Amino acid sequence: MAHAATPRTPRDPVGPDVLATALAAAWQGVLGTPAEEDTDFYEAGGTSLHAARIAAEAAECAPEVEDLDVCLMTALLDEARFGDVRRLAQELIDLTHGAA
């Protein structure tokens, strides 16, 4: 059963737990396998189309962060490990909120 997300205002920062949850849920939904810190995107069966879908779904957790979906997709294709992708995306979110 899905839980309703707590609404955020555009100025609320997206914390690591929110991003990790959104990214893991998108990964699980698209690839059908759970994501652990060292899970490799390609070994889990990921393709560029999967990367685009995961990135688009996960980026919904922070719609105010410009190009988060692009960052996530690039990280999935380049870094491949879940933990690395999550860290890179969180850095972008933190930079965005620090600049606001």
Image (tube, grey):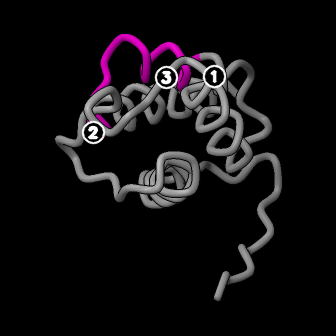
Q: Which residue is mark 3?
A: 47
What range is drawn magenta here? 71-83
The spot of residue 51 in percent (x, y) is: 55, 27
Looking at the image, is mark 2 or mark 3 earlier in the sequence?
3
At x 46% / y 56%, what residue is drawn? Answer: 32
Q: Which residue is mark 2?
A: 83
Q: Is residue 97 above or below residue 26?
A: above
The spot of residue 23 in percent (x, y) is: 50, 48
Classify mark 2: residues with Cα within 10 Å, few (<14), some (14-19) or many (20+). some
Q: Are marks 2 and 3 in contact (CB under 8 Å)?
A: no
Q: Which residue is mark 1?
A: 99
Looking at the image, is mark 3 or mark 1 earlier in the sequence?
3
Q: Amino acid at mark 3?
A: Thr
* The N terminus lies in quadrant: bottom right
Viewer-closest of 39 and 67: 39
Q: Amino acid at mark 1?
A: Ala
Numbered disc 1: secondary structure: helix
Foreground tag (3 vs 1): 3
